[in-house]
């Protein structure tokens, strides 16, 4: 398949299926683009940080695709490693969200008493019991104001041109706040951080990304692999851009708490997905083994001695969720799909990633196993299924 076709396939996958899947897993990293309240140098100002995030994401995915197409599956991250990365990424998002919520009113401003920014010279337009900056303190870049009962300083009356609010100090004030021209160094760290967050998304792939990575491996060339993953990154770019701008809008509209709560939920979701994918959460379905539902998923043994199971991968999970097979005999599991574009199209089973067709069947062959339980999960760790191997009668 040529590079143009691979790019078109990746782009279609990103637009059709990757939008919800990828933003659900990777979107929490966008909280790193949100500045703390009152930080004018923070990356939540303007579209530039969002563009830097998308550029870093595109560059990283393109490089990964080239590497996969050149080196093959040897450089692909396994399910357990991916689960650990999901937990780490989710933890980072949770920490960022908690810090954002804690710093929401770190300046001590009372939102119920807002004053025009021009009248007070306060960029946040807040009125606090102590002026918003503590007793005797002043906003950054300003001299402390004298107490109300003190006499005016003759020095200030005799030399008004020496005031810290005079015109010569404006550039220094802008530099301190990071509100200078876009070319100032204050914005560079913010944009670099945004680009690094975009690059980090390759370590927490969604189910659709895993499927396109397998395509990149099969491309057999650096150009083909790069084209496939570049198409995916571009296809999902509109959704990430919209989410990044939404977070920026929430913060600029003084709804940082809402953005922080949403980010906290996304981080916890990502941590939970990683724990489920790695099998590090208690399986509440264990007591259901031996139930009628499990019996309905019992394997049938053919004349060749091979056991065969059929499992449907649906948008709601795997059906049956629990199956039973005899220990000590090989088994074939036929995973079937019908118009499935959800995360169950990719699954991790027995330490390997399996990509299913949108509609069709993929057979996974397992060697004879001892008594016990085999657990598998979708690529995002949202849905799990089990095969219990019992002693033959």
Image (cartoon, rainbow, N blue to C red):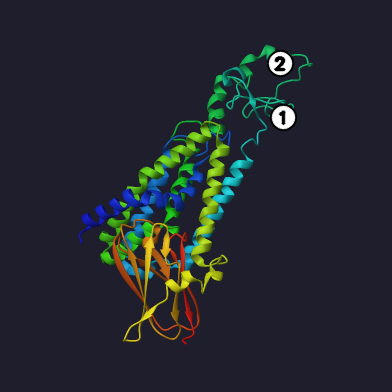
Side (left or right) of 383 relative to 209 = right
Q: Is mark 2 on a helix, strand or loop?
A: helix
**Residue beneath the point at 74% across and 20% down:** 146
Residue on which the image places disc 1: 134
Residue placed most toward the observer, 138 or 266:
266
Side (left or right) of 35 relative to 26 = right
**Residue beneath the point at 52% across and 32% down:** 252
Q: How many labels does the image show?
A: 2
Q: What element carries label 1?
A: loop
Image position of 272 with respect to 239: above or below: below
Residue 199, x across and y down, in percent: 42, 53
**Quarter of the view holding residue 65:** bottom left
Q: Which mark is residue 297?
A: none
Residue placed most toward the observer, 138 or 304:
304
Q: Is residue 156 visible?
A: yes
Residue on which the image places disc 2: 155
Q: Which of marks 2 and 1 is nearer the N terminus?
A: 1
Q: Which of marks 2 and 1 is in front?
A: 1
Q: How crowded is mark 2: few (under 14 residues within 10 Å), some or many (20 or more)?
A: few
**Residue beneath the point at 57% across and 33% down:** 176
Side (left or right) of 232 relative to 84 = left
């Amino acid at each position: 398949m040529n590079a143009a076709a691979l790019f078109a396939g990746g782009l279609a996958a990103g637009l059709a299926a990757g939008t919800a899947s990828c933003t659900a897993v990777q979107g929490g990293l966008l909280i790193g683009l949100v500045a703390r309240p009152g930080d004018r140098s923070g990356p939540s100002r303007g579209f530039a940080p969002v563009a830097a995030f998308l550029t870093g994401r595109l560059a990283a995915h393109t490089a990964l695709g080239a590497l996969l197409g050149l080196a093959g599956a040897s450089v692909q991250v396994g399910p357990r490693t991916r689960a650990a990365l999901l937990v780490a990424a989710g933890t980072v998002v949770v920490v960022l969200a908690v810090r954002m919520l804690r710093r929401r009113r770190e300046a001590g401003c009372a939102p119920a008493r807002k004053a025009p920014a021009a009248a007070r010279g306060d960029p946040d337009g807040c009125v606090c019991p102590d002026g918003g900056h503590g007793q005797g303190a002043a906003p950054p870049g300003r001299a402390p104001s004298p107490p109300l009962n003190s006499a005016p300083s003759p020095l200030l009356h005799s030399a008004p041109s020496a005031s810290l609010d005079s015109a010569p100090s404006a550039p220094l004030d802008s530099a301190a706040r990071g509100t200078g021209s876009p070319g100032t160094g204050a914005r560079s760290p913010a944009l670099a951080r945004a680009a690094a967050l975009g690059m980090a998304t390759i370590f927490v792939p969604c189910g659709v990304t895993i499927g396109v990575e397998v395509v990149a491996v099969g491309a057999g060339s650096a150009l083909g692999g790069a084209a496939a993953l570049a198409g995916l990154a571009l296809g999902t770019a509109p959704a990430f851009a919209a989410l990044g701008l939404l977070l920026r809008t929430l913060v600029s509209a003084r709804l940082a708490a809402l953005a922080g709560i949403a980010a906290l939920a996304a981080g916890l979701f990502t941590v939970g997905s990683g724990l489920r994918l790695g099998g590090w959460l208690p399986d509440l379905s264990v007591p259901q083994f031996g139930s009628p539902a499990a019996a309905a998923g019992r394997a049938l043994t053919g004349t060749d001695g091979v056991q065969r199971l059929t499992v449907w991968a649906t948008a709601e999970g795997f059906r049956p969720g629990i199956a039973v097979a005899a220990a000590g005999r090989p088994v074939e599991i036929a995973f079937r799909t019908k118009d499935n574009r959800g995360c169950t199209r990719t699954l991790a089973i027995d330490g390997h990633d399996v990509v299913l067709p949108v509609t069709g069947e993929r057979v996974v062959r397992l060697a004879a196993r001892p008594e016990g339980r085999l657990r598998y999960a979708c690529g995002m760790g949202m849905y799990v299924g089990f095969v219990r191997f019992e002693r033959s009668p």
